[in-house]
């Protein structure tokens, strides 16, 4: 009788093990997935740090600029790229982890697709502003302190962000211009500048 009871207990333990061992393996695989995502994020950030010097050279190819300004522009660009890379890596890792835990991710993917489409349509202006800001920074079209005319608005550049460019006009007014709406930029102080004026003189005056 005792032998049968022991055998029954062993059988119950084996049944429990059969239930939990697969979950243990799944948990280990989830940990590996998350660890790999962390590693890829770390590698992506290190690679972007190596791209920093290239980005600074690309922005400085049109002329001289102060080192702090170039570093600020490069840091702005690389911060956005690092956040984007981290978001993509962790989203993929999350989907893989949920799949390992036997969650049905297809409805979630469909919902994310619909939400992403709606968000993309609603954020078109924001994405356009970011792309415009990236191009302004990469192509070094304007710099802080430049006297410029943007879309007919004249002033001194006070800030260059990914989404907006801030100008201060002669009367002290601050103009915040969305980068995605910038069509024409006239830089009046790139490397050198002229001031053209007309004067009326009498015929007998000494020029």
Image (cartoon, rainbow, N blue to C red):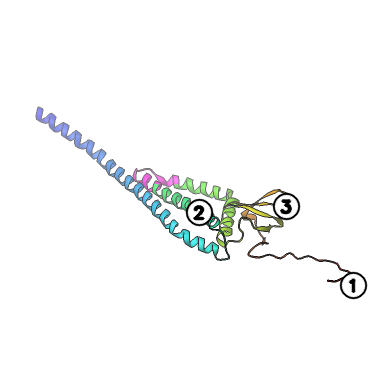
Residue 7: percent from left, percent from top: 13, 33
Query: CA separation, marks 1 and 3?
Result: 38 Å
N-term mark: 2 or 3: 2
Give residue 204's mark: 1
Give the residue drawn at x 52%, y 46%. Answer: 115
Give the residue pinned by disc 3. Answer: 170
Give the residue pinned by disc 2. Answer: 75
Q: Are the residues tagged 1 and 3 within 8 Å (C-beta)? A: no
The region drawn magenta spans 94-108
Give the residue drawn at x 45%, y 53%. Answer: 85
**Residue found at the very far top of the displayed protein:** 1
Q: Quick one: 203 or 2, which is closer to the camera?
A: 203
Give the residue drawn at x 74%, y 50%. Answer: 171
Secondary-structure class at tag 3: loop
Residue 158: percent from left, percent from top: 63, 52
- Of labels 2 and 1, the one closer to you: 1
């Amino acid at each position: 009788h005792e032998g049968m009871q022991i055998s029954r207990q062993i059988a119950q333990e084996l049944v429990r093990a059969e239930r939990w061992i697969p979950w243990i393996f799944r948990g280990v695989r989830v940990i590996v997935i998350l660890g790999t995502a962390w590693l890829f994020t770390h590698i992506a950030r290190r690679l972007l740090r190596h791209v920093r010097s290239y980005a600074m050279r690309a922005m400085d190819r049109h002329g001289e600029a102060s080192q702090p300004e170039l570093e600020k522009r490069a840091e702005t660009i690389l911060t956005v790229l690092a956040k984007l890379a981290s978001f993509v890596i962790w989203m993929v890792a999350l989907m893989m982890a949920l799949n390992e835990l036997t969650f049905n991710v297809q409805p979630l993917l469909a919902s994310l697709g619909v939400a992403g489409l709606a968000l993309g349509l609603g954020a078109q202006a924001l994405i356009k502003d970011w792309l415009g800001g990236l191009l302004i920074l990469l192509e070094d079209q304007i710099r802080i302190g430049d006297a410029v005319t943007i879309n007919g608005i004249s002033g001194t550049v006070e800030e260059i962000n990914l989404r907006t460019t801030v100008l201060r006009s002669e009367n002290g007014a601050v103009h915040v211009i969305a980068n995605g709406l910038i069509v024409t930029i006239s830089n009046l102080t790139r490397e050198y500048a002229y001031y053209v004026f007309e004067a009326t003189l009498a015929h007998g005056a000494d020029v």
